[in-house]
């Protein structure tokens, strides 16, 4: 059960800074009941589409750029209908060149636009890596603040879809490692709808990782009340024996693990990180101080990863509360395997529980 | 003989001034001659003045580097005509995306060159605001990265409709500078693709100074680089880059066309880096004196002076320019020595536009750490 109160009731995507103590569930039961008409059930892909539509409608400077995002609506149809609605000068089917997309988005941002770039698949962001890391990320800094780079880069990421090579990658750590960027990932339709709008409203560059295996999973959205700032992490299930934290497509796995554990008498608290850079540690630390144990789960390879960073920071800040070392559950440090093997590569509920057992054994 | 890759047809290089300073336009120059009519007598003199001021400043900056006052200097000796002529072809509302050697372009656009010395002294990463410095954007040290920024900016001009309005005070265009070496970077090709696709109001100004640090241009391209645009559907023109009038006239035409909505163009300016790549370079390791000498014989300033003398400009003018140039250099030197080192906040400020918890924590820690050195001394 959820024992946290809703403290933030922002109706516009303005709150950017995570204040750990404000982290709270997005929609309190009472509020949802009061505003029943504002609840819509949409798959995550459509939720992002709705968020993009609102951003395009609210601000004529918002542009979408990418490969096949026009009449086709993107390979995952996330931009479906937007080209017809807003025209080719707002929804740009660009030439097929990722460095070109990011590099020209930088020029457009200098001109006052707010480009939202779609990278078609996670594994194809690297031709744009130089423009993202050596240009976009430091542009404001090297200008000593005289330019802003309100650019969002949307990246469908992660596995579980049985795809061919380069279509199931989790490259978020490269960007979390780069000063000047912000990196977020929603795990629910509600968050996807609001976080994409907050990312577009941010005056900093935001890497927006979309867990593509969730695109077609329905979830409730409160289109009237956001509830959680962009960079806040959030306890999504309370527990007392151990904390597990993850982001994006890991969340359903973590919740499943918590269900199984509950049947076996172990109470697991689940934290949805939501923001990978910066990380909002306050709810996580509070949870660890309560449970004394932490398991970090991610699809990305574990070596020098987001999970490594969380393990290091929690060890520094909650050392005396820990009953066991922080344990990482991650993709193996191998290339992403042929998809027939992804079930072994990707952390499952069982692998998470195996790690929880190891933690509890200390 | 049929043209082949190894022996392409001789380029119809646009030249107005011969290497010895005679006004003798090449056949290919005909369509560009009317653009000279825009120049007042003062403009003709200003071209000379700016080239000389730049070269003198260049020498002074190299001295500052040798004396340990700059971390590095990037000389432009030999390339002044290409830069001055093209810079004067821009209008105030245009935007300029330089590489890292276009100091005089910045000067002409209104940038205080102290900004460039501050950067090379290790005080900033660029730091000037293009909006208040003639729309002269920051130097870009990742080769060719700026080509895409320029193209994106030009796409924005296009979307905003400040092109082809017929109002010369309003229509805008972009000029982006890059080198023969940078032309091999993918970002130049991608910029050409986007520019052609969106028909951006834009001139790609390629200074072929024949070297990318030590590597001669033949390693970059077996065909003349002015042809590089043609496969993208972008017209290319080769000019004698040591001829300031050719640079002005040709760039004026293509910038005018860009502002009028006729899309992007490429200009290859043939020139030569007479000095080292930077003060960290040693050109004796990769090129012979005879080659350098042959280019010094085609010096942009000497030829233009001969031309101006032929137009009746008197010696007092040239003496006055020399004096102005050395005053400028001396003043630049003085101000360079007065540049103060940045304080610690500069590390943390402007990393993000909006508050960021990690940066705030680290800045607070660094302040406490710095302050701890003062404790117990009072
Ligand atoms: C992407 C990248 N690779 C390598 C370098 C190192 N580098 C700096 S300048 C230079 C040569 C550039 O030659 P060119 O484009 O002809 O310009 P020039 O220096 O001659 O003006 C190289 C290799 C760099 N700055 N950026
Ligand atoms: Mg060169």
Image (cartoon, coloured by chain):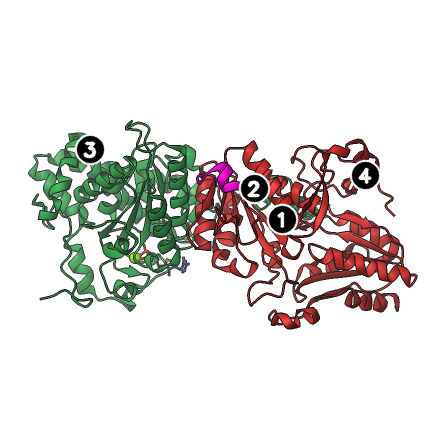
Which one is closest to the eye, mark 4 or mark 1?
1
Colour displayed for chain A in the image of the structure: red
Which one is closest to the eye, mark 4 or mark 3?
4
Subunit under mark 4? A
Point 50% across, 45% down: residue: A139
Question: Are the residues flagged by discs 2 and 4 in contact, CB closer than 8 Å?
Answer: no
Residue of label 3: B43
Tag 1 or tag 4, which sits nearer the N-term? 4
Label for residue B350? 2
Residue of label 4: A28
Q: Is residue A83 magenta?
A: yes
Label 2 environment density (alpha carbons within 10 Å; few <14, some 14–19, many ≥20)? many
x, y percent for residue A282 = 78, 47
Quadrant for residue B31, please give it.
top left
Residue of label 1: A45
Point 18% across, 48% down: residue: B300
Q: Is residue B253 above or below residue B61?
A: above
Point 12% across, 48% down: residue: B28
Chain appearing in green on the rendered image: B
Quadrant for residue B319, please give it.
top left
Label 3 environment density (alpha carbons within 10 Å; few <14, some 14–19, many ≥20)? few
Q: Which residues are magenta?
A: A81-90
The Cα–Cα distance between marks 2 and 4, rounded to whole angstroms, is 37 Å
Front in this rendered view, residue A31 or B308 = A31
Tell me whether marks 2 and 4 sit on the same chain. Answer: no
């Amino acid at each position: 059960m959820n024992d946290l109160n809703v403290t933030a009731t922002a109706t516009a995507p303005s709150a950017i800074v995570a204040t750990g103590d404000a982290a709270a569930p997005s929609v309190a039961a009472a509020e949802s009941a009061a505003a029943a008409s504002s609840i819509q059930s949409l798959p995550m892909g459509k939720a992002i589409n709705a968020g993009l539509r609102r951003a395009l409608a609210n601000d004529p400077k918002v542009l979408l750029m990418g490969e096949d995002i026009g009449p086709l609506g993107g390979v995952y149809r996330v931009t479906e209908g937007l080209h017809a609605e807003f025209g080719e000068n707002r929804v740009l089917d660009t030439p097929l060149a990722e460095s070109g997309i990011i590099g020209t988005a930088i020029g457009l941002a200098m001109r006052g636009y707010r480009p939202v770039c779609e990278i078609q698949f996670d594994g194809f962001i690297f031709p744009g890596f130089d423009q993202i890391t050596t240009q976009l990320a430091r542009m404001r800094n090297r200008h000593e603040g005289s330019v802003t780079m309100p650019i969002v880069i949307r990246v469908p990421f992660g596995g579980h879809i049985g795809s061919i090579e380069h279509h199931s990658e989790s490259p978020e750590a490269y960007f979390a490692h780069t000063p000047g960027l912000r990196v977020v990932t929603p795990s629910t339709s509600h968050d996807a709808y609001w976080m994409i709008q907050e990312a577009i409203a941010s005056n900093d560059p935001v890497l927006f990782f979309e867990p593509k295996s969730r695109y077609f999973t329905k979830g409730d959205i409160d289109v009237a009340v956001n509830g959680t700032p962009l960079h806040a992490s959030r306890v999504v299930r309370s527990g007392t024996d151990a904390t597990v934290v993850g982001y994006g497509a890991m969340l359903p796995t973590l919740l499943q693990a918590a269900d199984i554990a509950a049947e076996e008498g172990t109470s697991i608290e689940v934290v949805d990180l939501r923001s990978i850079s910066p990380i909002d540690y306050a709810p996580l630390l509070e949870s660890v101080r309560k449970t004394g144990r932490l398991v970090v789960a991610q699809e990305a390879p574990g070596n020098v990863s987001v999970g490594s960073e969380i393990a290091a920071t929690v060890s520094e800040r909650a050392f005396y509360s820990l009953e066991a070392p922080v344990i990482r559950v991650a993709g193996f440090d191998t290339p992403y395997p042929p998809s027939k093997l992804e079930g072994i590569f990707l952390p499952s509920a069982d692998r998470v529980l195996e790690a929880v057992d190891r933690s509890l054994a200390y | 003989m049929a043209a082949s890759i190894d022996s392409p047809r001789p380029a119809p290089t646009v030249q107005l001034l011969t290497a010895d300073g005679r006004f003798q336009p090449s056949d290919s120059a005909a369509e560009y001659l009317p653009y000279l009519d825009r120049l007042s007598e003062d403009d003709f003199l200003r071209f000379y003045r700016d080239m000389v001021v730049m070269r003198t400043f260049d020498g002074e900056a190299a001295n500052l580097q040798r004396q340990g006052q700059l971390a590095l200097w990037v000389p432009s000796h030999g390339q002044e005509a290409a830069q001055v002529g093209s810079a004067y072809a821009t209008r105030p509302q245009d935007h300029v995306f330089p590489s890292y050697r276009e100091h005089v372009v910045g000067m002409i656009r209104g940038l205080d060159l102290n900004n460039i010395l501050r950067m090379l002294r290790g005080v900033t990463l660029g730091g000037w605001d293009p909006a208040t410095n003639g729309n002269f954007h920051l130097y870009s040290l990742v080769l060719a990265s700026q080509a895409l920024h320029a193209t994106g900016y030009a796409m924005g001009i296009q979307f905003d409709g400040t092109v082809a309005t017929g109002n010369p005070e309003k229509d805008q265009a972009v000029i982006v500078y890059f080198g023969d070496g940078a032309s091999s970077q993918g970002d130049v090709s991608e910029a050409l693709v986007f520019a052609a696709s969106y028909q951006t109001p834009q001139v790609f100004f390629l200074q072929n100074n024949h070297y990318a640090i030590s590597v001669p241009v033949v390693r970059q391209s077996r065909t003349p680089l002015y042809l590089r645009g043609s496969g993208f559907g972008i017209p290319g023109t080769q000019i004698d880059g040591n001829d300031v009038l050719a640079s002005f006239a040709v760039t004026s035409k293509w910038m005018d066309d860009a502002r009028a909505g006729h899309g992007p163009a490429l200009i290859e300016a043939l020139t030569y880096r007479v000095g080292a790549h930077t003060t960290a370079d040693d050109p004796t390791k990769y090129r012979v004196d005879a080659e350098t000498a042959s280019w010094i014989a085609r010096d942009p300033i000497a030829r233009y002076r001969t031309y101006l003398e032929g137009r009746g400009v008197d010696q007092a003018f040239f003496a006055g320019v020399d004096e102005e140039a050395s005053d400028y250099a001396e003043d630049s030197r003085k101000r360079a020595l007065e540049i103060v080192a940045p304080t610690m906040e500069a590390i943390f400020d402007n990393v993000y536009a909006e508050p960021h918890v990690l940066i705030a924590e680290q800045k607070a820690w660094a302040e406490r750490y710095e302050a701890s050195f003062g404790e117990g001394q009072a």
